[in-house]
Amino acid sequence: NPSKPHFNHYLFECLCVAIRAACKQSQAAVGTFEEALFAPFTEILQQDVQEFIPYIFQILSLLMEQHRGTVPETYMALFPHLLAPILWERPGNIPPLVRLIQGFIEQGANQIEAEKLNGLLGIFQKLIASKTHDHEGFYILNSIIECMPQSLVSQYTRQIFILLFQRLQSSKTTKYIKSLLIFFCLYAIKYGATNLIETIDGIQPKMFSMVVERLFVPDLQKVSGHTERKICAVGVTKILTEAPAMLQGEYEAAWPKLLQALIGLFELPEDDSVPDDEHFIEIEDTPGYQTAYSQLAFAGKKEHDPVGGDVPDAKLNLAKHLGKLSTGHPGKLPTLITGLEPQAKTYLQHYIQAANVTLV
């Protein structure tokens, strides 16, 4: 009964608790729940019961995540329908839909063909155009970069970056810049720092220098969240130590500034300042009445760290990569490091000593 929202919410919460408990005990329980729930869920979706649809998407995500390593055909058959524009017109649908789409990408990347990827990128384009939902668009994009074959994604890369810079130019917000920096760093981690620089410079010559000066240096410290900051730390380390272009020409002048920003990310408090004109973005961007999104606590997604296993300590990771870079370019790094502020040099020396490396 949609007229009793609290009862409905806790009914769906109870269902999530039952799914988690039963499926933890027996994998066979997943199929039992799917058999019992798919028919009523389908009816709710077909009849467009708006109050229930966000709950359905959350429970479908929870059920699908019980399958390991692949997405069953029953879910893949649903996938094209999830890209229907009408579903994405309702703000209450967007967070659970994005989570469900991420599940498809993360578990079934090899099952998504080029045609479906094109549809996903259409959703991404729609979301980043919104000041309220742009971060949701980045969630989808980051999952694509992390999980899908580079050979499939590469044909769209230039257009993706053009769209990102167009939005940056037309409507820059603090939230958007933070999401953009996280994306750049994840891209560098997955595809390489040189690929990142060449892709950006392919849009406009020497553009990456502006990206460092106008985005990374002033705004890296604003990135929030433990995992997000770690992604940025690892990504910036790759840019500093694995991209030959950063040690040549005009990019060489940006190198110590970027290292200074990275040390600031490690050591300084998070910069959580937001311009006054950004406080009411969500109200301005969502006119009229819309069904609210009510997150189910027991359908929550486990936080994912794309670099967790490879990089347990980001500071030591920086020191080790600097040591390796120094070995290949004797005399280069000590000169560049003179451009750091005194306190930053002290912090860096601590990292180097802890990692037991020497810069030559």
Image: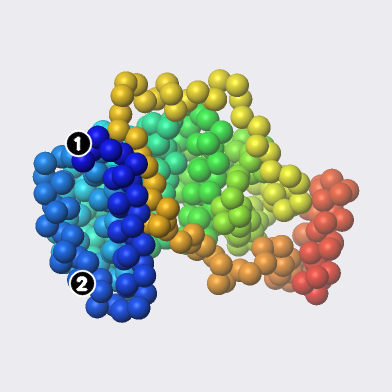
- The quadrant holding residue 32 is bottom left
Residue in the picture at 40% in, 36% down: 133
Label 1 element class: helix
Mark 1 and mark 2 lie on one chain; the one further toward the N terminus is: 2
Q: Amino acid at mark 2?
A: Gly
In screen coordinates, is 255 left or right of 341?
left
| x and y, in percent, of residue 232 in the image | 59, 53
**Placement of the C terminus among the 4 image quadrants:** bottom right
Circle number at residue 334: none
| x and y, in percent, of residue 213 in the image | 64, 38
Label 2 element class: helix
- The quadrant holding residue 52 is top left
- Tag 1 near tag 2, CB within 8 Å: no
Residue placed under numbered mark 2 in the picture = 31
Residue in the picture at 80% in, 58% down: 348
In screen coordinates, is 86 left or right of 21?
left
* Foreground residue among 243 and 30: 30
Residue in the picture at 64% in, 44% down: 220
Q: Is residue 280 above or below residue 87?
A: above
Which is closer to the viewer, label 1 or label 2?
2
| x and y, in percent, of residue 310 in the image | 57, 71
Q: Is residue 71 above or below residue 335?
A: below
Residue placed under numbered mark 1 in the picture = 86
Residue 246 visible in the shown view = yes
How many angstroms separate mark 1 from mark 2 (CA)? 29 Å
Rendering colour mode: rainbow
In screen coordinates, is 115 left or right of 303?
left
